[in-house]
Amino acid sequence: MAATDLERFSNEEKRNLSLGGHVGFDSLPDQLVSKSVTQGFSFNILCVGETGIGKSTLMNTLFNTTFETEEASHYESAVRLRPRTYDLQESNVHLKLTIVDAVGFGDQINKDESYRPIVEYIDTQFENYLQEELKIRRSLFNYHDTRIHVCLYFITPTGHSLKSLDLVTMKKLDSKVNIIPIIAKADTISKSELHKFKIKIMSELVSNGVQIYQFPTDDEAVAEINSVMNAHLPFAVVGSTEEVKVGNKLVRARQYPWGVVQVENESHCDFVKLREMLIRVNMEDLREQTHTRHYELYRRCKLEEMGFKDTDPDSQPFSLQETYETKRKEFLGELQKKEEEMRQMFVNKVKETEAELKEKERELHEKFEHLKRIHQEEKRKVEEKRRELEEEMNAFNRRKVAVETLQSQSLQATSQQPLKKDKDKKNFFSLPSACSITSGRYVN
Ligand code: GTP
Ligand code: MG
C-alpha cells in the first residue's frame, strides 16, 4: 500500500471517543519527567571572546560555583578549543555541563583563520553524533552528547561598533550554533553609551545578515517574556564571584572607589536576564534547536555529500536501499575502471621495460663486437712482432754459428802455424765489417 493511501485510510479510521472514566494516560507527561530526571541532562556552552574578557568569571557567576580556570596567555599561535565537563546537581536534577573555551581568540596578528578551529570543533561534535546514529548498534540513550547548544559571544565594550573579527566569526557560526551575543564587562561603559552601543551592534548584525538566536515566542507560557527579552539583546553583563555587603545583605558585586556594581541588580546590568533566558526559560529550547535545526542541517549536507537523497530526479521517493544500490553500482563501476587503468598501466610499463632491456642488450652486443675487433687487431700485431723477433733470432743464430765456425777454423790454423798467430788474430777480428756483440744481441 502506498504511503498516501495509508494516510487516507488511517484518517478515515480515526474517531473521537469519550472515556467512561479515568484510564491513566494523563500521567504520560509525569512519566516523561521522571524518565528525564533519572537519565539526567547535558548542556554544552561555547564561550568565544578575546583573552581576559571575563568568560570564566561569567561562567562562575552564572552557575554560582568555581570552575577550574586557567588564564590564557596572549601568545597562542592559533585559536584552540578547551572543553571541560562537570557534573552538577540542583535538587534531584543532574546536569552534565560542558564549557568550551576558545583559547587565544583574537590574539594572533593574522586573524583570518581565527574562526576555523571553532567551526571545526562544532562540526566534529556533530560528526561524532552522526557516526553514533549511523551505527548498527546505537547507544544514543547513554551517549554523551557533546554538540554545542549555545555560543556565548563576548563583545568587547568599546562603545563604538563590532570588530570585523566579531562579524566574520558570528557569520561563520550562525548556521551551526545558537549564538547569544553579550557585551562583557558592561560596568566599564556608561548607561547612555551602552544604549547606543546595543542599537549599533544589532543594526550591524542585521545589515551583515548574521542570524543570532531568538528566544522562541511560539509557546504561550514564555512568549511574552521571550519577546520582551529579544528586544534587550545583546545582554550587557557584569561578572563577579566577590561578595560585597550592601545594606545588611551580602551580594555578588564589583566594588569600586566610587560605588558598587551589583551583578544581580537589573538596573546595573543584564546578568539576571541572561541567566533567566539561558538557564531557567530556554535551556530546553536551545537543546532542541541544536538538534532539529543545526544538527539536521549538518546531517542533511553530510548525507547529500555522500550521495544520499530522498527523491530521484523525477521527484519520486527514493529509498535508502535504492540509493545504496546505485552507489554500490557506481562504486563497482569506478573500481572496475580503475582496475582496467591499472592493468593498462602495468602492460605499458612492462612493454617499456622490455624495450629498454632490448636496447641495453643491443648496446652490450655492439660493445662486445668492438672489443672483439680490438682484441683481434692486438693479437695480429703481437703475432707480427713475434714473427719479426723469431726472424731476428734466426739471423742471430746463423751469424753466431758462422762466428763460431770461423773461430774454430782460426784456432786450428793457429795451432798449425804458431808463428803466424798474431797476424791471423788481427785478420779475424777485422773480418766482419763494423760488426759487434752487445749484451747478447747481435747488431749489424
Ligand atoms: P582567559 O580565560 O584568560 O581568556 O580570560 P577570561 O575571558 O576567562 O577572563 P577572566 O574571567 O579570567 O577575567 C579576566 C579579568 O577580568 C579578571 O581580572 C576579572 O576580575 C575581570 N572581570 C571579569 N568580569 C568582569 C566584569 O564584568 N567587569 C570588569 N570590570 N572586570 C571583569
Ligand atoms: Mg578563562
Image (cartoon, grey):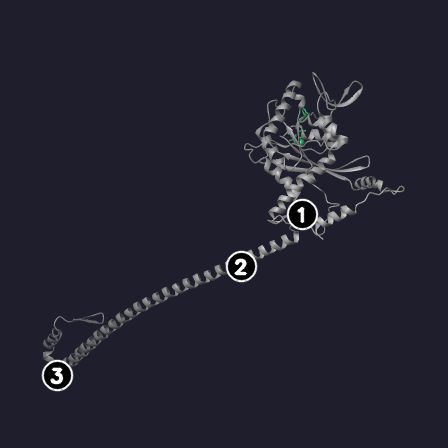
Whether residue 411 is visible to the viewer of this picture, yes or no, is yes
- Provide residue 413's location: percent of width, then percent of height: 13, 82
Circle 1: element type: helix
Q: Which residue is mark 2?
A: 339
Circle 3: element type: helix
The mark closer to the camera, 2 or 3, is 2
Q: Earlier along the polypeptide chain: callout 1 or callout 2?
A: 1
Viewer-side residue, 407 vs 354: 354
The alpha-carbon separation of the residues under discs 2 and 3 comes to 113 Å
Placement of 7 over or under 239, stated as above or below: below
Q: Residue furthest top?
A: 258
Left or right: 424 in relation to 281: left
Left or right: 340 in relation to 28: left
Query: Hey, what amino acid is under mark 1?
Result: Gln
Q: Residue at x 9, y 79 (%)?
A: 420
The alpha-carbon separation of the residues under discs 3 and 1 comes to 135 Å
Q: Residues within 10 Å of mark 3 (few under 14, many from 20)?
A: few
Circle 2: element type: helix
Q: Which residue is mark 1?
A: 131
Q: Which residue is mark 3?
A: 416
Q: Residues within 10 Å of mark 2 (few under 14, many from 20)?
A: few
The alpha-carbon separation of the residues under discs 1 and 2 comes to 30 Å
- Provide residue 86's location: percent of width, then percent of height: 73, 37
Q: Residues within 10 Å of mark 1 (few under 14, many from 20)?
A: few
Quadrant containing the C terminus is bottom left
What is the quadrant of residue 410 in the picture?
bottom left
- Provide residue 35's location: percent of width, then percent of height: 81, 42
